Amino acid sequence: MALNGDDKDFDWEPPTEAEMKVIQARRDRQDKISKLMGDYLLKGFRMLGECCDVCGTILLQDKQHKNYCVSCQELDSDVDKDNPVLPFFSCFFFRVLPSALNAQAALSQVRERQLAAQSTAPSQAPELNGGPSSSSQASVLVPLPRPEHCEGAAAGGRALLPPPAIPSPAPLPPTPALAPPRPPVVPQNPPLQSMLQEAEEAVLIKLRWATNQLQSSASLESSIQLCSLITSCANSLRSLKELSQ
Amino acid sequence: MCAVQSVGMLPVEHLHLEHVLQTVCVLESVVCRSFGPEGGQVLFTQDTGQAMLSRSGARILTALRLEHPLARMVVECVLKHSTETGDGSKTFIILMASLLRIIHTTACREPHVSRTHTSKAAAETASARHLADKMLAFASEELDDLIAAAVVPYGCCLSWEELSAKSQAHSNNPCVQNLLASFFQSRVGPTHCDLMSNLTCELLTNWKFKNDSPSSSLHFIRDNLAALHTPVSGFPISFSRLVEGQVIHRDFAAPCPRADLQPVKAVVLTGYLQPKLLRAGEVLELGRGEQSEERNIMDFSAWGERSLECVLANLQSLGVSVLLSAVKQSAAVLALATQAEMSIVECVSEDELSLFQRLSGATPVRDCRVIEPEHVATLTFCRPILLGAHRYVHVAFHDTEEKITVKPCSLVLCGLGEGQTDQFACALKDAMRMLLSTWDPIGITAAPFKQCVLEPGCVLPAGGTFELLLNNALLQHGSSCSISDHTNKGVPAVSQLLAKALLSVPRQIYYHSPRRLLQTQTRLLSLTKNHLSIAHNKILTQSHREDGTLTEPCRGEVLMSGSGLESVSCKSQVLLAALQCVSSLLRVDAVLRTHTALHTQSHRRTNISWAGTEDEAED
């Protein structure tokens, strides 16, 4: 449904496939931004008369008078991902967020859920309780970064994996059936030293496995996951060593 | 709006099409979740604990905190439109957003290069402006006729005279109850829509002035609605009812009249019975009388009391036992009235007094020294009525001339909480406005000599029928224009763009079931195809009918069975208003930033003050 005429003044060509895709992507992004902004407005945010310097989107202001740009701080597909230091917003924002804003956020959420699932995977030493092993996992569970944290915080939070104070359960690869038994924290067990040694061995095995996988890994996301696995293995080893001393 | 305070250069921001589009799209995303029969309600809460429940686009938009000047401009337009038509605020925003999107796409594809522009963005904006103006011009000139020819035949005209026939409510014949029921369904939900529409129809029936056009009685009800209904919170809506006579929203200041006294005579006072002669800052000079004794203040107040007693004695001689006062009377008046066994109701609002005056036929007392029988109103009773937590005055009128034609009644509207009651009361107000704009249609063309083509009471089945039919008509009009007139290539494009923009409304309505959209569209298309060849003459005869009644089964009947109704006049006004707003928005070139507070409370119409005081403290 093209408008006729007027082409004598300038030569217009129909957009190419690639340009159409870009236009479509831009339109989708704008729709997403509008929807998010509408959500925030209904939550009591104020729509300011100013635009963001970076992307030109209309700025919102929360009740604490902090300015917020929806596209820069939530849909930042263009902003560098390496920056781990991101502003931490007031807790008001945490209840808000929609899921899967873009592919990266979706993947990071999947990762979080996998981590959460794996930490509750039954891997209790069978000699402790005959029954289901998940009962004492609660004591071993460490607070993982919650999926509700915004994508930026999750990106930054990759560096902040569970604190090494407790022997953290090493995030297992998705084969829970083969998971080696993990030492529980509760100290009424057989000698600590042998448990720690077993734990160390298990962690080292996993570390080796992760390294092998990393060498052959082709996808970005799995590489990131493997690196985080290696980091947590290293942390576990460090804390095991501290415990044994 | 506010004075320029800083001397020197003000920061100027040039508006691009993207900004305008984004602003309106954000507002659209806010309202579209409440749009349509499956739309939800928005619950607004304040820190003070007040809650507001609403599905009305105008209320939702007013409650948002918007500082962006374009957004505020759009909300103002929506408010003004809603004050006139009572309906269609969400449709307004959705149409605006889709018009802007289409204009944006078209303008970016082929910017107007008849003048040199500083940048591509400026060229796009200029081209968009031009396109919007063309669309508005097209709509102002040709849309009315298109609607009359291609949309109205599929609807029908509701008869105002059949309003009281309750049996019609469940039959297949379209009637005012159906129109109201579908309106209330979009405002208060499907549970209570029938109850509300029955109550409203009863109210309208009682207030029907015989030998008068529907629009004049609708005008009367709309103007006096505040005095004609009482919102009561704390009861379920099924407790709502009509009470005979008028409810004055004040309590008795002096004890109530004796119940056995009938008929009750009342007098309306607009001023003070005991004039306030001693006010702060004034000097009262007491003159010397003929006997050269000095007057003192005690004599003066004694004299004042004596004259007051005379007035009350005069009232007693006329048999008056109730005084309705527009102002607060002094304590002496109250004391003397109690002694004389008269009741006083103070601080009655002006509209209630004018309604009382109209119904009772008595003129209000201006000068208390002159009280004639013409000032005395005769009431059947005047007693307190307890509605919820408040006690009001309930009066019923003796048979007067007016009463033969009209049965005065007042609607007691109950709701469980304040938010819900408020929602029902606003829905009632908007329903009256909607009915008025249906029976008093203003055509799209503002030409003074051209008669409005729309018949009063013209309605269509709800559910996007108007938009789909008009879309079809515009596409056909566009193609027929391009066939006949090859040189004028602008016009078909404009009608096609408008047609495309109109489709956004049914898409939103059937957002959750695209299949139903396709079914409706197919059905309408087949109907139009079947009747296109036969019915051309029929259209001409039907649209020129003199009386507004349903004379022959028209195509509209095919579509009517069981569906809701909506007013054609409201729909066409929404479309025109959206086009006007879009073209005004696109004419904005630049935004000047000033340093003063911008917020004015003048346009905030909500009863609960949703604009917090922190808004005022902005620098």
Image: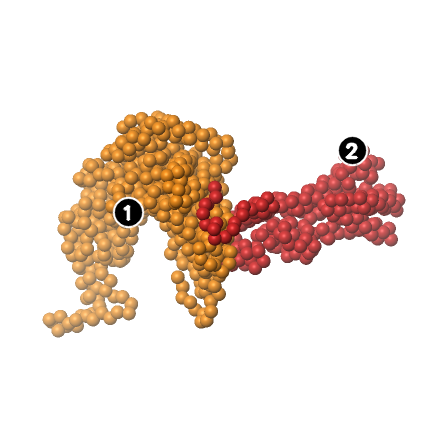
Chain colours: A red, B orange
Read off the chain for label 2. A
Instruction: Tell me if A8 is positioned left or right of B77 in this view.
Output: right
Read off the chain for label 1. B
Foreground residue among B73 and B282: B73
Foreground residue among B191 and B177: B177
Q: Amino acid at mark 2?
A: Gly
Judge whether residue B22 can be spotted in this image: no
Discs 2 and 1 lie in a common subunit: no
Label disc, if present, on residue A131 of the rendered structure:
2
SS category of the residue bearing label 1: loop
Task: Tell me what residue is drawn at x 26 percent, y 34 percent.
Answer: B544
SS category of the residue bearing label 2: loop
Tag 2 near tag 1, CB within 8 Å: no
Viewport quadrant of the N terminus of chain B: bottom left
Q: Residues within 10 Å of mark 2 (few under 14, many from 20)?
A: few
Task: Tell me what residue is drawn at x 58 percent, y 52 percent.
Answer: A71
Q: Is residue B190 above or below residue B609?
A: above
Q: Is residue A34 above or below residue B513?
A: below
Residue that sits furthest to the left in the current view = B290
Label disc, if present, on residue B447 of the rendered structure:
1
Task: Tell me what residue is drawn at x 38 percent, y 56 percent.
Answer: B602
Q: CA distance from mark 2 to mark 1?
A: 87 Å
The percent position of residue B569, horizontal first and vertical second, equals: 34, 40
Instruction: Tell me if B309 is positioned left or right of B561 in this view.
Output: left
